[in-house]
Amino acid sequence: MADVFEFDRDGLNLWSDEERFEVTRERLAEYAAATNDPIAAHRAGDVGSPVFAIVPVFDALMAPAVDVVPMDIFGRITHGEQDFHFHRPIRPGDKLVSRGRVIGWETKSTGSLVYIHLTCADEASGDLVNEQYLSGFFRGVDAGPNVGEAIPVIEPYADVKTTPPLAEATHHVDDDQTFRYAPASGDPVPLHLDEEVAKDAGLPGIIAHGLCTMAMAGWGVLAEVADSDVSRVKRLAVRFSKFVFPGDDLETRIWRAGAENGVTTYAFETVRGSDVVLSNGIAEIAD
């Protein structure tokens, strides 16, 4: 039976305070190294990898939910989906401004989803650099009637995945991966760093950051179908399906799903053996 909690409607569409972030070549390179990214421009800090976009917005990531979700259950949140929409790449010297808002929530049979919209803009021009949509899942929580709107649909392209993949990329999660990713990303959540905390939460041990796994899939897709050119990536989205652990060997499988207006859509998923750890992957790549 689900626990019933009242979410605060006054927090709906309430923008968080602006968070500022100055991009350095060193931080871009650190993030690439922390995600085992082999692309030379990322490793040198010349340009940010696609999922580096989470770093400037991280402080604005959960702030909107605080205005909506009761503090009693805030610690139950897990990352459901992440959807990046890119206007341009992030480069050294960028001064960025980010903010977020809750756009809605929805009660499912197993818990409730909170939907968050984030923007990241150039401080000087005000032009958008990227927009991000994510869902946070509260297992076993009944938030009552659905409110507001959901994030954009991430199409599963199930029929496409019945055919052999166009390309595949492999990744290994190092034993020290989480300890490198935490400072590079600014994500200090103890489930990724403290065995005791992870086991107290019912896990067999520390888990990899979901966005680190997404970053690995992102550079895999980029290398296989976009000539390692981050400026061609217009959208990158996934659903986080299963936990990933240090020592895991992963494979990202990529399918061509269609093309329109000079942009090709690729479907992808990342697996550990028979387990799908990232599902509903979408990459929209400019031709």
Image (spheres, grey):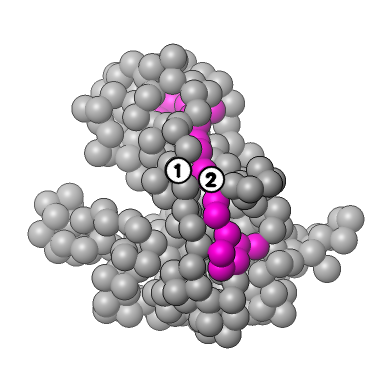
Q: Give above or below for 168 relative to 157.
A: below
Q: Give above or below for 41 relative to 254.
A: below
* Left or right, residue 273 beside residue 180: right
Q: How many marks?
A: 2
Which range of residues does the magenta coloring cover? 89-112
Q: Give above or below for 214 relative to 253.
A: above
At a point 53% along the width and 82% down the height, the residue shown is 44
- Magenta stretch contains residue 100: yes
Q: Which label was assigned to residue 212?
A: none
Image location (x, y in percent) of residue 188? 27, 56
* Left or right, residue 238 beside residue 166: left
At a point 53% along the width and 76% down the height, the residue shown is 45
Q: Residues within 10 Å of mark 2 (few under 14, many from 20)?
A: many
What is the quadrant of the N terminus in the image?
top left
- Magenta stretch contains residue 152: no
Looking at the rendered structure, the kind of residue marked 1 is Glu
Q: Quadrant of residue 260?
A: bottom right
Residue receiving disc 2:
97
Residue receiving disc 1:
19
Image location (x, y in percent) of residue 244? 35, 65
Image location (x, y in percent) of residue 137? 39, 38
